[in-house]
Image (cartoon, rainbow, N blue to C red):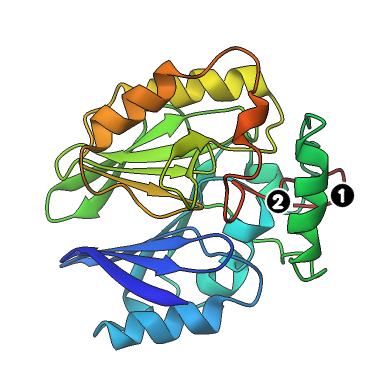
Amino acid sequence: MRVIELLPRLHMFDFPIGHAYLWASADGLTLIDTSLPGSAPELAAAIEELGHRRSDLRRLLLTHSHQDHAGSAADVAAWGDDITVYAHRADAPVIRGEAPGPAPELADWERPLFDQVHSRIPPVPPAPVRVDRELDDGDLIELGDGVRAVALAVPGHTPGSIAFHLPEPRVLFTGDTIARGPDGEVILGVFNVDPVQAITSFRRQARLDTEIVCFGHGQPLTENASTRLRAAAGLLSSVRARSTAGRHDAPASPGSSPGTR
């Protein structure tokens, strides 16, 4: 796992599958996603190498319920008593282990890719984790130093997928709703439970004013982010294009099937 500075207060934890991001402020840290189960020790070590303590964490924001994003949430939430765990209310029961996640609607070209990705993920189900605050579209989260995150409901990848937009620094965290391939191309995330809804959610995010876009898979956009998102959104159709297959170094999520998260 590599640590990449995107802004003085924003770092990317570049995992092989499922990136996480750290936002630092004077009143504590905010972690966005946690990668796969077993990633908490690496996250803690990286946070400490940046000069913080794991006990400085105040907020854990989960973009959705899949195990490559919420997989280590239980371990991270146990770092301290002052950590608030946030997730959209539609995915909260899955994250808490109360319900299975719905299976993705896979196109024919996605099926071998889906199997390939799952073969790289340890067969260890993530531990259930509490959700302290269930989010709805438009909810605000105070990150400290006057910075707010706006919770955007962007369903399609999962029913409760959520993006976090920081208007003041113009940063967007997309989770798996949008991804970026190894060639740098911005693409619709794969393995969606509702592909048409996923396209609508992509287009909604493309309308935002952004300078940095942080994906769950693929390298962040740090130049011309708004322009590139809008260009990619303009290429989407109501039917998933086969051409997106094979352009993804770590596809937008291993997805979920009944009984998995």
Q: Estimate how packed mark 2 is, as few (under 14), some (14 to 19) or many (20 or more) residues with alpha carbons within 10 Å.
A: many
Q: Estimate how packed mark 1 is, as few (under 14), some (14 to 19) or many (20 or more) residues with alpha carbons within 10 Å.
A: few
Q: Which residue is mark 2?
A: 254
Asked if residue 145 is positioned above or below residue 37 in the image, the reply reads: above
Sequence order check, earlier mark of 2 and 1: 2
Please tell me which residue is depicted at 57% across the width and 55% down the height of the picture: 249
The location of residue 145, given as percent across then percent down, is: 12, 56
For mark 1, give the secondary structure: loop
Closer to the eye: label 2 or 1 = 2
Asked if residue 140 is positioned above or below residue 5 in the image, the reply reads: above
In-image side of 127 versus 173 (left or right):
right
Decide which of 182, 12 is in the foreground and name it.
Answer: 182
In-image side of 41 versus 138 (left or right):
right
| Total labels drawn | 2
Which label belongs to residue 29?
A: none
Specify the amino acid type for callout 2: Pro
Report the residue that reaches farthest toward the right: 259
Query: Residue 82's image quarter?
Result: bottom left
Please tell me which residue is depicted at 72% across the width and 66% down the height of the picture: 127
Decide which of 257, 127 is in the foreground and name it.
Answer: 257
Please tell me which residue is depicted at 24% across the width and 49% down the height of the picture: 222
Please tell me which residue is depicted at 40% across the width and 55% down the height of the picture: 219
Asked if residue 172 is positioned above or below residue 62 in the image, the reply reads: above
The location of residue 227, given as percent across then percent down, is: 25, 28
Alpha carbons under labels 2 and 1: distance apart: 14 Å
In-image side of 227 versus 66 (left or right):
left
Specify the amino acid type for callout 1: Gly
In-image side of 99 versus 148 (left or right):
right
The location of residue 61, given as percent across then percent down, is: 44, 53
Decide which of 90, 189 is in the foreground and name it.
Answer: 189
For mark 2, give the secondary structure: loop
Q: Which residue is mark 1?
A: 259
